[in-house]
Amino acid sequence: MLQRAFFFPHALLPEGWAENVRVDITDGIIAAVTPNQTDGEAETIDGVAVPGLPNLHSHAFQRGMAGLAERRGPANDTFWTWREVMYRFLERLTPDDVEAIAAFAYMEMLEAGFTAVGEFHYLHHDIDGRPYADIAEMAGRIIAASRDAGIGLTLLPTFYAHGGFGGADPLPSQRRFVNEPDRFFKLLARIRDLVGSDSAIRAGIAAHSLRAVTPDELRRVFDAAPEGPIHIHAAEQMKEVEDSVARLGRAPVGWLLENMPLGPRWCIIHATHMTGDETRGLAGCGAVAGLCPITEASLGDGIFNGVAYMAHGGRFGIGTDSNIQIDAAAELRQLEYSQRLKHQVRNALTSVEGESTGRRLFSSALAGGTQALAQNIGGLAPGRRANIVVLDSSQVDMVGRGDAWLDRWLFVAGKSVIRTVLAMGERLVEDGRHVRRERIERRYRNTIARLAAL
Ligand code: NGQ
Ligand code: ZN
């Protein structure tokens, strides 16, 4: 049993802000949280302690192409032309490449305020589309990368079978993703073995989208996971909504609400284009909307129905998705700003006079992300993992206290105020840098240099 104790002058607890807080940790799990203490023999960490945020949606490998799709093509560029660039990028990735890129992305997540990640994992097979000798080779590399960086992982093995609605054949460029159901279930079983009883990792399940799975296949995938999180992309692009209406008679979110038992186990990624009824339905069913504001802006997806969704009590979390920029504060800021631009108002996602927008965004994303990743995270409380982000309150932009610290972090200072990050009680980020940055970055640089030279 490994016992540790830390002392924080200020901390955000589930019941609110507290001072002089001692946190006792046993084997990475919080054993006790006691405000109004003296530091005693505990390790003092100066600054403002807040819970680490969950990053509920990542495609780690895409970090390796960040910034490489910002050049205009022959015609109008869209999500779909970006996707072609992305497919060309992943064509040549080896398991080693994926592990190196994922470790780098996960390290950056820790430096940026995320202490757990949901990896929506669909890059399963070898370059020629055949399964690796170990069918879960790539999943194993994701797990290894998460351990190397020290981030908590909810691995979401993703079922992918088709190139469009109506069970269309997959494109050649999708060969590394596809399985028929039985092979997917073999992969799933093997991944569950790999995850085993590691307390920092859990396996959920995902179906890529209503484009990539038929209704029958979706039901089979759902039946294969009697418990745990279920994630699916839905309604990110108008073309997807139109095709869904044409082929299934309903837009994706409406179809899911009508045909699947949506509820707290579900995380609907993007849900960008929804009618008023769909917005109300999704908010009311207890599922989490997995918003990825920076990627959605980068890809020109559209703007989430945030104000109405929140007014109906909808739950959301945030994801870094394409990993073009990894920064928890920037995701929340982009979400709020998208709503301000859409409605021409300020403090769009709050509802009560005097409420801090930073606090509202932070608390909502913490709760929603925790639900979507289904891990014992989400607050500084006994039984949860000791995942703690410490903000440097001495920085010039961190004047004020309490919720003002969150407003300053999210809207002004950004990730530069993150000084120390603990994951499962281990000090993984010091002075804003991951303690293993040098090695992880060196490996990543070699990988992208090799890929660029191919
Ligand atoms: C993905 N990413 O699976 O990586 C997708 C693109 C698709 C985003 N949608 C591929 N942001 O949706 O077909
Ligand atoms: Zn995605």
Image (cartoon, grey):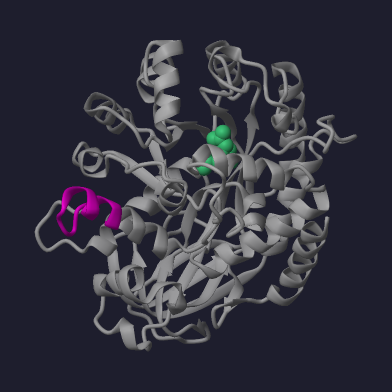
User: Is any part of residue 382 visible from this angle?
Assistant: yes
**Magenta-drawn stretch contains 155:** no
Residue 374 visible, this orientation? no
* Depth check, front residue: 192 or 438: 438
- Quadrant that contains the N terminus: bottom right
Residue drawn at point x = 31 percent, y = 69 percent: 411
Return the residue nearer the eye: 402 or 187.
Answer: 187
Looking at the rendered structure, the number of numbered marks drawn on it comes to: 0
Q: Is residue 441 left or right of residue 352?
A: right
Q: Position of residue 440 (x, y in %)?
A: 73, 69
Q: Residue furthest front?
A: 74
In the rendered image, the vertical position of residue 358 relative to residue 216, given as above or below = below
Quarter of the C terminus within the rendering: bottom right
- Please tell me in which quadrant of the rendered image residue 180 appears: top right
Residue extending furthest left? 353
Q: Which residues are magenta?
A: 337-349
The residue closer to the viewer here, 84 or 183, is: 84
Q: Is residue 28 left or right of residue 10?
A: right
Question: Dividing the image into four equal quarters, which quarter contains ligand 1?
Answer: top right
Q: Is 449 rendered above or below residue 384? A: below
Q: Position of residue 28 (x, y in %)?
A: 60, 63
Residue 358 % position (x, y): 28, 63
Q: Position of residue 184 (x, y in %)?
A: 72, 24
- Residue positioned 43% across, 27% down in the render: 239
Q: Decide: is 412 above or below 1.
A: below
Tell me what residue is drawn at x 83 percent, y 31 percent. Answer: 131
- Residue 235 position by quadrant: top left
